[in-house]
Image (tube, rainbow, N blue to C red):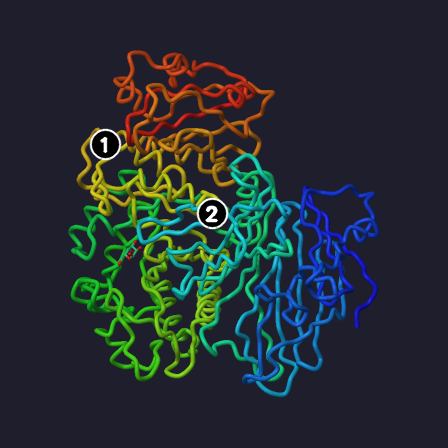
Amino acid sequence: MSSPISSWRLDAANTTVCVLTGKHVPELHYFGPALGAEITAEELRQLSDDSVLHASLDEPTALSLCPQASLGHAGSPGLAAHRNGKRFAHRLQHVHTEHKANSLSFQLADASAGIEMHLTLKLDELTSILTINTAVVNRGEDDLTVDWLASATLPLPEDHTELLSQHGRWGGEFSEYRRALHPGLTDISNRHGRTSHEHAPWVMTGPQGFGDQHGEVLCSHIAWSGNASLRIERMNDGHASVQLGVLPLPGELILAPGERFEAPPVIAARGTGINAISHQLHTHVRQHILPPWTRTPRPIHSNSWEAVYFDHSTEKLFGLIDACAELGAERFVLDDGWFGRRRNDTAGLGDWFVDPEVYPDGLQPVVDRVRQHGMQFGLWFEPEMVNPDSALYEQHPEWVLRLDGIDTPLARSQLVLDLSIPEVRRYLFDCITRLVHEYAIDYIKWDMNRDLVLAGNGEQARALAQPPALYQLLEQIRASCPTLEIESCSSGGARVDMGILKHTGRVWTSDNIDPIERAQIQAGFLRIYPPEIMGAHVGHKAAHLTGRETSLHTRAIMALQGQYGFEIDARRLDATERSALAHYTAMYRKHREWLSRSVYYRLDGQHDSLVASMQVADDARIALLTVVAVTAHPHSRPGRIKLAGLDATVHYRVALESLNRAEIAVFSRQLPHWLNDVDRATDTGPLISGELLMKTGLPLPVLPPQSALLVSCHAR
Ligand code: GLA
């Protein structure tokens, strides 16, 4: 039976959480701007909405942290479970609360249904991020089939009428879409078996037109690298909610008596404007998610893929390694093509042994060449995969995910290994750690290039078991190779989420290195994840995925937004290109330390033809402004751009850092005053107050399509 209503508070720097207990399942009564300390729990309790409506159930139906169909909730429930078709509903009651300094844990139970649930809400005092964990235990005597379990159900404020989410494709990740939240269910379901290019694992809601700097925004993210459902629902009783949970395949989530299922956590942020959400999430990811190596200066990469693809002749590689070292690379990554039978992308995956035909002396000569230049050595793997044309598949066809009686469609000529089989993990662990130890490998590019289709063990679905098995394998490898760094790549950015980032500390953002396309891709990535883990390479003049030709300045400026590197045939650069690139490489070295703690601002308010953002040091003493002209501007004069994040009380020396003033100058008869005045060498650029830069803005020159500007502001 219901106990007396109590209220519980959690407080952080700028946020208060209030939960009411007593009516079945606890309700998240308030998750908003910090409330005064003098506000009592009793006052909050008085504002609980107990109204009972005509033509409805006779009991009030507030939206709880786990809405129950048995109480008449006609929207998506928090839990849908049954026992072989029986006991199709349950009535969870609040049993116990544990209140610690910054967390609340609730135990709920339905003894007759044999279901126990544990809900924990943790509010981070510094960042104000709310983390929600949910677990279900089968206390019955037979199997409990869980069709759906929300990791979290969060009520939406009444004025949250717009939804922002990201979707994409290979080579076009992280595109933003907005839609109005009309009555009914918006269900963003990812069934790709990996995080996917198609749907990012988070959603943001806010009032209509919420922007980078305005509107109360709520962002909810599920820390999970597999199938998931994001459900946003508006009901006619005024309730609106966002729900996030794993999406089991039919019959996949069956709990044996006594078994417990821990749902992946939901990470929720609220604040004014999307930039505030980005700041909180970047800090959270830096402090609570990423491995520790990400806090050391991020080395400059040089990746072999677009330079040589599968053509791994030692002569070519030596030339490439020498040229990359000359460019200033600090880590050389040997991409796909080094292992058994891997002369193209139809064979060899699974055979993680150096190909003796291509490398008769093993990888040592290549590794030595890399080390002679003082560079680190990185190697590409795609451990979760196997080609049918491989020794591994010949020996262990039973190791692949499959459903007996139906052929699994191939993708890039490959199948997926069932990582939940301990022998598979053991095999991969042995292959990878042996090579890491043999060659003192510093870094692995861990790729994953296909969706899971028919992901079963022959009979039962196994998609849900893949992400935890992968996390476990990564943990074991890291424990055995403590200094090894690992990147998450999945045909570019198809596996970016706060689950995988606990085990990997860098992302290959996209296979698309065209800087104009990258402007949108990187802006999308940076909404949620910090810049220092965003792999960003200077590519070829004609981008391999789009054929578009761009200037070296635009390519380098975009690469400087993230963990800078090269994906270019460095042997073929001429002297002018090499010297321009040397300038940007030196800039990365100079600024990377503060950039890895920087605060990111997307600058809205311009025409869509311009993508602009700033990275500001945490003490606001230095900032870099990036503006990319993705197309032509509709006006002859682009106008002023208002900067953000600066100290209004300080004067800044404003300087153009990109070496393309001459290229841009020809498009105007006269450049804006501040651009004419500036001379980086003598440090005599104009001194302008932070207040004016933010309130009046910096006038932009005419930017020809596909050009970019990099501007620094140094506090004086
Ligand atoms: C994927 C990755 C690329 C490259 C290739 C190698 O497409 O995203 O960066 O490593 O695989 O096959």
Give the alpha-carbon distance from disc 2 to disc 1, as whole Å: 44 Å
Query: Looking at the image, is 589 positioned above or below residue 660?
Result: below
Say which of marks 2 and 1 sits in front: 2
- Location of residue 622 in the rendering, given as x and y in whole percent from the top left corner: 50, 28
Quadrant position of residue 662: top left
For disc 2, the neighbor class at 10 Å (few under 14, some 14 to 19, many from 20) is: few
Query: Looking at the image, is 586 positioned above or below residue 472?
Result: above
For disc 1, the neighbor class at 10 Å (few under 14, some 14 to 19, many from 20) is: some
Q: Which mark is residue 282?
A: none
- Location of residue 151 in the rendering, given as x and y in whole percent from the top left corner: 58, 63
Label 2: which secondary element: strand
- Location of residue 53 in the rendering, given as x and y in whole percent from the top left corner: 71, 59
Label 1: which secondary element: helix
The number of discs equals 2
**Sooner in the amino-acid sequence: mark 2 or mark 1:** 2
Q: Which mark is residue 179?
A: 2
Answer with left or right where residue 233 lies relative to residue 494.
right
Q: Residue at coordinates 36% horizontally, 68% vertically from top-left?
A: 452
| Residue toward you, 207 or 407 | 207
Q: Which residue is mark 1?
A: 577
Q: Residue furthest front?
A: 55
Q: Is mark 2 within 8 Å of ligand 1?
A: no
Quadrant position of residue 367: bottom left
Quarter of the N terminus within the rendering: bottom right
**Residue type (three-letter) at the residue carrying disc 2:** Arg
